[in-house]
Image (tube, helix red, strand yellow):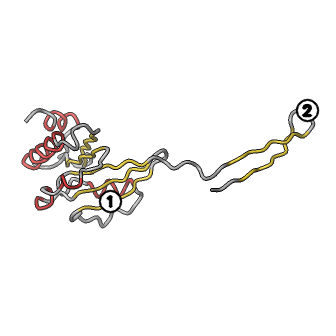
Amino acid sequence: TLVCYINIFCDCNSGAYCFRALCCKGPPPPRPEYDVVCIGLTGSGKTSLLSRLCSENTDNVVPTTGFSIKAVPFQNAILNVKELGGADNIKKYWSRYYQGSQGVIFVLDSASSEEDLEIARNELHSALQHPQLCTLPFLILANHQDKPAARSVQEVRCHCLQPI
C-alpha cells in the first residue's frame, strides 16, 4: 500500500504562509469492470466495433473463429467483452459463454439481405429469451449505417423487435 504525504505551503490571502498536508493512501480506486457478451451474425461488424472501441487498426479485420475477449476501457468503467463468432457452426455454442454476463451487445448488419435480417431477428429473439440473458440489459446495434442499402434504425426496430 502506497502512503504519501505532500506538504504544501501557500499564501493564505493574509500575506502569511500556512501549512496544508494532502494525504493519499494508495492508488486511486479501480474502475468497475463489467462482463458483456457480444453476439451477431458473421459480417455484422462485431470485431470492427470492438477494435474501434479499443483504438485498434480495423484495416485487416477477419471474422472471429470461436471467441475473443477484449477489455474496452472507458473513463468510469471497463467492459470485458466476450465476442462470439457468428458462423453457423459456432452459434450453437453461444450459450456456453453466457454465464456471468452482465449485459449483451447484439450487432446486426442493417444493410443485410432480408433473409439474413430474418436470421438475425431469430437469433436476437433466442438471446432475449435465454434464461441467462433475459434479465440483462441489451444493446442492439444496427451497424453499417453508412452503406447505401442500410435500413434506418426505425426499420430495424420494427422488423427485429416485433414478436415472432
Q: Position of residue 104 (x, y in %)?
A: 27, 45
Residue drawn 30% across the image and 57% down it: 48
**In the foreground, 150 or 48:** 48
Furthest toward the right, the residue is: 15
**In the foreground, 86 or 57:** 86
Furthest toward the front, the residue is: 1
Q: Quadrant of the N terminus?
A: bottom right
Question: Which disc is residue 59 wearing?
Answer: none
Residue drawn 38% across the image and 47% down it: 34
Kind of residue at disc 2: Ser
Q: Position of residue 95 (x, y in %)?
A: 18, 52
Q: Is residue 116 left or right of residue 148?
A: left
Residue drawn 91% across the image and 32% down it: 14
**In the foreground, 86 or 1:** 1
Q: Please name the residue that numbered disc 2 is placed on.
A: 14
Identify the secondary structure beneath mark 2.
Answer: loop
Q: Quadrant of the C terminus?
A: top left
Choose mark 2 or mark 1, whichever is in front. 1
Pointer 1 local density, CA inside 10 Å: few below 14, some 14–19, many at least 20: some
Q: Position of residue 13 (x, y in %)?
A: 87, 33
| Above or below for 124 versus 60 | above
Kind of residue at disc 1: Ile
**In the foreground, 67 or 140:** 67
Pointer 2 local density, CA inside 10 Å: few below 14, some 14–19, many at least 20: few
Count of picture labels:
2
Q: Is residue 104 left or right of residue 93?
A: right
| Above or below for 157 versus 30 | above
Q: Position of residue 25 (x, y in %)?
A: 66, 49
Q: Mark 2 or mark 1, which has the lower sequence index? A: 2
Q: Is residue 48 left or right of residue 86?
A: right
Identify the secondary structure beneath mark 1.
Answer: strand
Q: Please name the residue that numbered disc 1 is placed on.
A: 69
